[in-house]
Amino acid sequence: MLKSRWFQILCSLGLEFWLPLPLLGLAFWVGSGFLMDGILSRTHQTTKYLKVDSQLVQPNKTVASIEAEINEYQGISRVKVKTNSSVLKELKFEFAITEFNQLEAAISQELGLPIEEIRKLMQIKQKTNSDKQ
């Protein structure tokens, strides 16, 4: 009779539902810990590789002018290329070249234009030892 009275009290409080919840929570916590440990300790060997095209696609640019500043004192040349493109307005290059013919060839190679077109568009400013900055 004593057992049935306690059982009736537990049933009235709803404890037959609430008492197993902490045990169920503990079981999920331990189970998820083992699952996460297994996932994180796996070795990740990627079987899929990204293929990259080695040729860079440059935006279509039309060269409007080329301004070169040769600084013999520092041994460098700074080149500013202005384009007619709406995306790319200006390019800046710096070369460790002070000789005019080599500079033309370097610009031609960088822009992918023939040297004759570079000569038409190029304006040169030359700095010497007397023009130190």
Image (cartoon, rainbow, N blue to C red):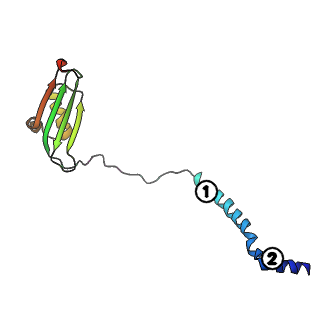
Magenta-colored segment: predominant secondary structure: loop
The residue to which callout 1 is attached is 36
> Does the magenta-highlighted stretch encompass residue 56?
yes
Percent from the top left, x then y, of residue 109?
Answer: 19, 37
Work out whether 44 lies above or below 22: above
- Element type at mark 1: helix
Frontmost of labels 1 and 2 is: 2
Q: Is residue 25 left or right of residue 12?
A: left
Is residue 62 positioned above or below 122 on the image? below
The span shown in magenta is 50-57
Q: Which residue is mark 2?
A: 10
Residue 98 at x, y = what percent?
Answer: 19, 25
Q: Quadrant of residue 11?
A: bottom right
Q: Residue at 69% of width from left, 65% of height from top?
A: 25
- Could you tell me the amino acid type at mark 1? Met
Residue at x 36% of width, y 51% of height: 51
